[in-house]
Image (cartoon, rainbow, N blue to C red):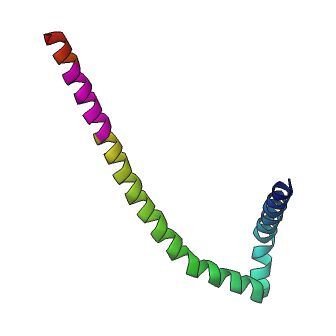
Amino acid sequence: MVTTLLVTFAVTVGLAVVVLLTVAAPSLRRRGSRTMARLDAWAERLLPVLRHHRARLAVEAGQARTRVADRLEAQRRGARDEHRAARAR
């Protein structure tokens, strides 16, 4: 129960911060807020890392799809072969 409360609190506070920054960011940038400058700099450093990981995951997902398709095809071939053997008997 305590874990649920803590997670709910963290999600609620996180969403509130995101909404606050979404609404307040343009005016804070216009006024030259150091906090917004730091957040923007942090986001600029983080964005290439996130793009790299997203690209790597896309490649891995493609490879996984290929492996699954290969396994399904092998199972289908095996089932067809078993069916032919059963008919031949």
Residue at point 35%, 42% (across, down): 68
Quadrant for residue 36, please give it. Answer: bottom right
- Quarter containing the C terminus: top left
Q: Report the side of 10 relative to 54 (left or right).
A: right
Is residue 50 a member of the stretch shown in magenta? no
User: Residue 76, image x and y in percent?
Assistant: 27, 28
Q: Which residue reaches farthest left?
A: 88
Residue located 82% across and 68% down the image: 20
Residue 48, percent across and down? 50, 75
Q: Which residues are magenta?
A: 71-82
- 76 and 16: which is toward the camera: 76
Instruction: Please tell me whether residue 73 is drawn above or below residue 83 in the rendered image.
Output: below
Q: Residue at x 39, y 58 (%)?
A: 60
Q: Position of residue 54 (x, y in %)?
A: 48, 64
Is residue 75 magenta-colored?
A: yes
Dominant SS of magenta comes to helix
Is residue 84 left or right of 9 when viewed as pictured? Answer: left
Q: Vertically, is 2 above or below 21?
A: above
In this rendering, the count of numbered labels is 0
Q: Nearer the viewer, residue 69 or 55?
A: 69
Q: Nearer the viewer, residue 30 or 40?
A: 40
Above or below — where is 21 with respect to 29?
A: above
Tell me: 79 left or right of 55: left
- Identify the residue shown where x is 27% and y is 34%: 73
